[in-house]
């Protein structure tokens, strides 16, 4: 059987939880990325992390040994600044609630970064930075409440770190939302333009989006009309993938990036059950009956196939009961 990667001409990869967690590479990720070019597959990185510039991100990837040019990184900071430029006139003052890298993207669009609501900004752009504190969020809230255009680079509620899962930009956006009662315009994932821009930059017609989050990577890739693959090295788990709503269901379920270089097992419906490899699953009301091992990813793939077929248009996340039989 052919390797899964042979079906695609490019990989659009997330970073946090896929390539690295915190400053360190996820085991095997760098080697997997290095294996793409020899197969003629292009590589782009699509990240919601707006705390560093694309050049800084690319430099970090190269330090880890991953192939990365500065133009290979497409960030939500870039998308946010582009959206901002569509909302306010050239030269307008913009309150930057985020990193120096985000402020630089704002400047590149001919806008003027400011750091206080007292400077009467026309807009607020909010992106993740580990240095943000209460005073920064308060300034954003003052400006947003006064009527400034409000753009969030992304709304990821969490971010994988070396020590575990930490609060992401979405938690900081939620604080300003709670204080003002307003909703931001969101520029990055899960919106499609970030993925479409990355594919266009690579000249790709058959990309696969790889990520660890259903609500950003997979939803955004699906919205862009691309194949999507979720990896189990970050936020989402087999259980959360099983209960995914329709819009967030991936095309492929992989343990790590290495699985791109293996044949992907066929899913076959027969006798009222869904079969993947030596595992199978069927639904019985709100129960998914699985024949296989919890440690076997094929068993989870079969369970997903069965449950998703039973609820093809689920608009909310579900929590089916699992019953295992070896």
Image (cartoon, grey):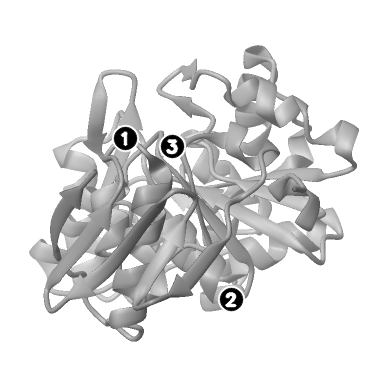
Picture coordinates of residue 46, whole percent (x, y): 60, 48
Residue 88 versus residue 80 in the image, above or below: below
Horizontal side, residue 140 vs residue 255: left or right: left
Of 321 and 280, nearer the camera is: 280
Of 116 and 205, nearer the camera is: 205
Tell me, yes or no, whether the two marked residues, 3 and 2, touch with CB atoms within 8 Å. no
**Residue sitting at 72 percent across and 59 percent down?**
207
Horizontal side, residue 231 vs residue 28: left or right: left
Is residue 248 shown to the viewer in this render? yes
Which residue in the structure is indicated by mark 2?
86
Of 74 and 14, nearer the camera is: 14
Horizontal side, residue 133 vs residue 58: left or right: left
Which residue in the structure is indicated by mark 3?
99
Which residue in the structure is indicated by mark 1?
295
Question: Mark 3 or mark 1: which is in front?
Answer: 1
Question: Mark 1 or mark 2: which is in front?
Answer: 1
* Number of residues whose C-alpha sits closer than 10 Å to that of mark 2, classed few (under 14), some (14–19) or many (20 or more): few
Picture coordinates of residue 108, whole percent (x, y): 67, 51
Q: How far apart are marks 3 and 1 (CA)?
A: 41 Å
SS for dot 2: helix
User: Which comes before the other along the chain, label 3 or label 2?
Assistant: 2
Residue 72 versus residue 164 in the image, above or below: below
Q: How far apart are marks 3 and 2 (CA)?
A: 21 Å
Residue 72 versus residue 315 in the image, above or below: above
Picture coordinates of residue 38, whole percent (x, y): 89, 31
* Number of residues whose C-alpha sits closer than 10 Å to that of mark 3, classed few (under 14), some (14–19) or many (20 or more): many
Q: How far apart are marks 1 and 2 (CA)?
A: 49 Å
User: Which comes before the other along the chain, label 1 or label 2?
Assistant: 2
Picture coordinates of residue 176, whole percent (x, y): 18, 59
């Amino acid at each position: 059987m052919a390797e899964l990667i042979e079906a695609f001409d490019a990989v659009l990869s997330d970073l946090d939880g896929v390539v690295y967690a915190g400053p360190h590479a996820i085991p095997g990720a760098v080697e997997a990325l290095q294996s793409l070019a020899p197969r003629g597959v292009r590589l782009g990185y699509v990240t919601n992390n707006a705390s560093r510039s694309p050049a800084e991100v690319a430099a970090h990837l190269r330090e880890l040994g991953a192939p990365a040019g500065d133009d290979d990184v497409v960030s939500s900071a870039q998308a946010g600044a582009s959206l901002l430029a569509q909302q306010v006139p050239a030269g307008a003052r913009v309150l930057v609630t985020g990193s120096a890298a985000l402020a630089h993207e704002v400047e590149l669009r001919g806008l003027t970064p400011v750091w206080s609501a007292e400077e009467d900004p026309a807009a607020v752009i909010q992106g993740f930075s580990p240095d943000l504190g209460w005073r920064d969020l308060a300034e954003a809230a003052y400006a947003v409440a006064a009527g400034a255009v409000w753009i969030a680079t992304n709304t990821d509620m969490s971010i994988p770190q070396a020590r575990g899962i930490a609060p992401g930009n979405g938690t900081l956006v939620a604080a300003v939302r709670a204080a003002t009662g307003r909703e931001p315009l969101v520029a990055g994932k899960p919106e499609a333009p970030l993925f479409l821009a990355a594919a266009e930059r690579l000249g790709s017609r058959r990309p696969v989006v790889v990520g660890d989050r259903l609500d950003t990577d997979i939803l955004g890739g699906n919205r862009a009309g691309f194949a999507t693959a979720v990896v189990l090295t970050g936020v989402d788990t087999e259980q959360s993938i099983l209960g995914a709503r329709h819009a967030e269901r991936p095309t492929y379920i992989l343990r790590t990036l290495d699985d791109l270089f293996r044949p992907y097992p066929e899913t076959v419906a027969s006798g009222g059950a869904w079969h993947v490899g030596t595992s199978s699953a069927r639904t019985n009301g709100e129960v998914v009956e699985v024949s296989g091992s919890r440690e076997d990813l094929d068993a989870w793939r079969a369970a997903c196939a069965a449950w998703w077929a039973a609820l093809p248009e689920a608009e909310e996340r579900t929590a089916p009961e699992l019953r295992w039989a070896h």
